[in-house]
Image (cartoon, rainbow, N blue to C red):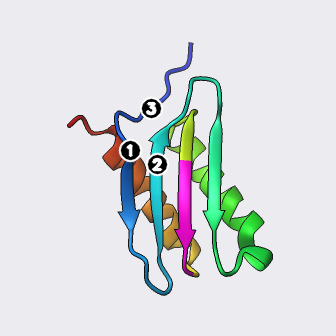
Amino acid sequence: MCSYNKLHKSALAGFEQKNDLVVKVSAAAPGSGIQIDLASPVMHQFGEHIENLVLRTVTEAGFQDVILQINDQGAWDYTITARVLAALERGMQNE
């Protein structure tokens, strides 16, 4: 049986400023998968790319059932990846 990382609490990472984003992660019901709620001024051009990057990042980090609320302000890929990983790490910490 495969072991997955789990979130113990909701967590935030990032800032609401140009070229950054805010990522909020929360635990989802078991079996519900990875759910992404993305808001971005570049949604029409890059929304699918951002969603795929987030999905890949969460999966590679070993998570299975996560809700992500993302408010993007034109962040580059490396920033998106870093903010998602930071939020997941913070969410794994016990209070």
Quick one: 94 or 3, which is closer to the camera? 94
| Secondary element type, mark 3 | loop
N-terminal label among 1 and 3: 3
> Residue 34 — which label?
none
Residue indicated by mark 1: 10
Q: Which mark is residue 25?
A: 2
Marks 2 and 1: CB-CB under 8 Å? yes
Q: Is residue 2 above or below residue 83?
A: above
Q: What is the crowding at mark 3: few (fewer than 14 residues within 10 Å), some, or many (at least 20)?
A: some
* Identity, as a three-letter code, of the amino acid under mark 1: Ser
Work out which residue is located at the far top of the displayed protein and give it: 1
- The answer to whether residue 72 is magenta is yes
Q: Earlier in the sequence, mark 2 or mark 3?
A: 3
Disc 1 secondary structure class: loop
Q: Does residue 10 appear left or right of residue 19 in this picture?
A: left
Q: Tell me the quarter of the image containing the N terminus.
A: top right
Alpha carbon separation for disc pair 2 and 1:
5 Å
Residue in view at x 56 percent, y 27 percent: 29
Q: Which quadrant of the rendered structure holds the C terminus?
A: top left
Residue for point 55% across, 19% down: 2
Q: Count up the numbered dots.
A: 3
* Span highlighted in magenta in the image: 68-73
Q: Is residue 90 left or right of residue 82?
A: left
From mark 1 to mark 3, how far is it between C-alphas?
A: 14 Å
Return the mark for residue 5: 3
